[in-house]
Amino acid sequence: MAEPIYRQIADSLRQQIESGELAPGQQLQTETELRDHFSASRNTIRDAIKWLISLGLVETRPGQGTFVVKKADPFITTLSADTGTGLGGGEGATYLSQVTEQEREAFSPAPQVEMQLAFGDIATHLQLDPGAQVISRHQKRYIDGTPWSMQTSFYPRGLAAQGADRLFEPADIKEGTVRYLAETLGLKQVGYRDWITVRTPNEIEAEFFKLPQDGRVGVYEVFRTAFDQTGTPMRLTITIFPTDRNQFIVNDGQVPPLQPHRGASTKKSLANPLPAVMPPLTVSLRWRPQLGSYIGADQVLCLVLAHDGVHFPPVAQARRSCLAWVGHTGNDQRPRALSDFPEPILPPPAA
């Protein structure tokens, strides 16, 4: 069976993008020019562009046109604690050292410090009464000049009252807050718990990270709760990572350092993107009509991708963000064009 015309047009443009004929950041021809070039209707050209958007190859800019997406070189964060210092990956000096090891350059402006009231997740993770005062220290972080993450740490107000008043200063604490609190108050961080979720970005995050407004690129939200020697939460750090430029590693036990592969440079080999063709996952899925999505029956991490178009990206694209690909359309809450879904995607059960 022949492929639809819009797919043939999309494949032609995709080959131009992958070959470099259409370079990252380059503008595609206008809709009228594409219609004339391919002798196709307006709707066919629009469906082809939608397909390329769903693949993450192009993006539309209101009033400007359609452009080839500039792919970010993913950065790998080791979330598990450093065996030497016990400090967690992705923050402070450990974060800076991980960036340097991958031959990248990190930059963070001075933190924005505020007094806030703890509600919801903040109060829950810090085990505080709703409305309790907390000190927040917020930083936007860049790698190679590109917005890479947003991090906010929350500390109970009582720590400053006990003598840790540098938490109020809008400047980096050079020795790190873990060491500062240990030396100032005798609070020793003995461990931390990471709680990782995936969601669509809010408007502030989408603007800072320059993400598509339709939510097709999600964000990881990592809740890290640090505990002192009495088992009391002493800090909550929430970090937002866009899924299109971040990968994570968790080490357990005595493992050797991650090494470059096949003689490639550390930067390129550690951040090698997934291949376009991947073997199918074996995941048991069940339909959740209230969410309009497939969720792993064994609660594997899945990313829900909502689109207004007819088609969805291939599973290889989404696997950069989750273990199993799921999605739904905006109207009927049921997947369409199931032929586009690789196994083991299953149709919804009969009503």
Image: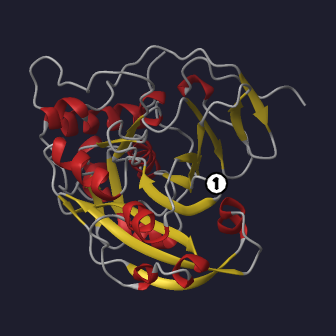
Front-lying residue, 101 or 277: 101
Q: Looking at the image, how many numbered discs can be counted on the residues? A: 1
Does residue 159 appear to the left or right of 210 in the view shown? right
- Looking at the image, is 152 positioned above or below residue 327? below
Image location (x, y in percent) of residue 35: 31, 50
Q: Nearer the viewer, residue 271 or 317?
A: 271
- In the rendered view of the protein, which quadrant contains the C terminus? top right
Q: Which residue, as the protein is rendered here, is positioned at the far right? A: 351
Secondary element at tag 1: loop
Image vertical order of residue 312 relative to residue 171, above or below: above
Residue appearing at x 55%, y 56% in the figure = 200
Residue linked to disc 1: 230
* Residue 16 found in image quarter: top left
Instruction: Pick the residue in front: 263 or 87.
Output: 87
Residue at 15% over, 33% down: 266
Quadrant of res 226: bottom right
Figure colour scheme: secondary structure
314 or 46: nearer the viewer: 314
Q: Position of residue 142 (x, y in %)?
A: 26, 62
Category of crowding for the residue at label 1, using alpha-carbon neighbours closer than 10 angstroms: few (below 14), some (14–19), many (at least 20): few
Q: Does 298 sit above or below residue 240?
A: above
Residue 210 visible within the image: no
- Identified by mark 1, the residue type is Thr
Rendered location of residue 135, percent (x, y): 53, 79
Tell me the quarter of the picture where residue 92 sits: bottom left
In this picture, residue 81 sits left or right of residue 312: left
Residue 325 seen in the current view: yes
